Amino acid sequence: RSIPTEEAIPELEIDVDELLDMPSDVERGARVKDLLVDCFKPTEDFISELLDKIRGMQKLSTPQKK
């Protein structure tokens, strides 16, 4: 019997709060790369898009200094 596609895709959680707390994109990128170590598809584009989104979130969550 064949396995439904949904079951074949491993579940992955990325803790965005953890990434937001990291001091640099280099560390964030390394953390995401570690999480995606079992992913067989190229991950560079995904990681760079994710880091872009996180940079946007940081701007939203950081109170503006007067």
Image: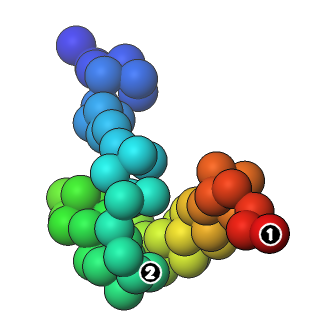
Report whether 31 appears left or right of 14: left
Report whether 57 appears left or right of 5: right
Label 2 is placed on what type of residue? Asp
In primary-sequence order, the first of circles 1 and 2 is 2
Q: In the rendered structure, find residue 49 and report the number of the disc placed on it.
A: none
Q: Residues within 10 Å of mark 2 (few under 14, many from 20)?
A: some
The residue singled out by tag 2 in the image is: 25
Q: In the rendered structure, find residue 66 and report the number of the disc placed on it.
A: 1
Foreground: 40 or 66? 66
Q: Is residue 12 above or below residue 53?
A: above
Helix, strand or loop at disc 2?
Answer: helix
Front position among marks 1 and 2: 1
Within the image, what quadrant is residue 24 found in?
bottom left
Helix, strand or loop at disc 1?
Answer: loop
Label 1 is placed on what type of residue? Lys
Q: Tell me where residue 48 appears, x and y as whole percent.
A: 56, 76
